[in-house]
Image: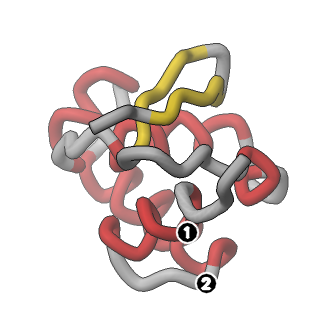
Amino acid sequence: ARMAEMELAGERVAIGSYPIADAQRFADLTEAEREVAIHLLQGATYGAIGQQRSASERTIANQAQAIYRKLRVRSRVELAAAVGTTES
């Protein structure tokens, strides 16, 4: 399977299989939320993200909820689907 790649928060991220992720979906997120979203898409736990970002697990959970609300999704699975559904 081919992986689509995009740059978010200065980092290359592989998403899904063939579809190219829609970077415009991240336009309304803060820089911190974009970075958390990248980690969520990579499957990291809130604890691991918090440790890497020097933030509490609760802070990361709050940022994840803000991401989900802004992108109108309810889970990591829906987040991955939302950013990886456009074809080039």
Kindly report the distance in space between the C-alpha atoms of the residues bearing marks 1 and 2: 9 Å
Q: Where is residue 43 in the image (x, y as percent from the top left)?
A: 21, 45
Question: Relative to residue 60, is residue 75 depicted above or below?
Answer: below
Q: Is residue 84 above or below residue 42?
A: below
Give whichever of 44, 32 is nearer the camera.
44
Judged from the image, the secondary structure of the residue bearing numbered disc 2 is loop
Q: Earlier in the sequence, mark 1 or mark 2?
A: 2
Residue drawn at x 34%, y 61% is 61
Q: Position of residue 77 (x, y in %)?
A: 31, 70
Residue at the spot of label 2: 72
User: Which amino acid type is shown beneath numbered disc 2?
Assistant: Arg
Q: Is mark 1 on a helix, strand or loop?
A: helix
The type of residue carrying mark 1 is Ala
Residue 23 sits above or below residue 49 on the image: below
Check disc 1 and report the residue beneath it. 82
- Identify whether 1 is placed above or below 9: below
Q: Position of residue 3 (x, y in %)?
A: 39, 33
Left or right of residue 12, residue 25 in this image: right
Looking at the rendering, in which quadrant would you find the N terminus?
top left
Query: Residue 23: image x %, image y %?
Result: 73, 45
Q: Do the residues labelled 1 and 2 touch (CB within 8 Å)?
A: yes
Q: Quadrant of residue 83?
A: bottom right
**Along the line of sight, which residue is nearer the eye, 82 or 1?**
1
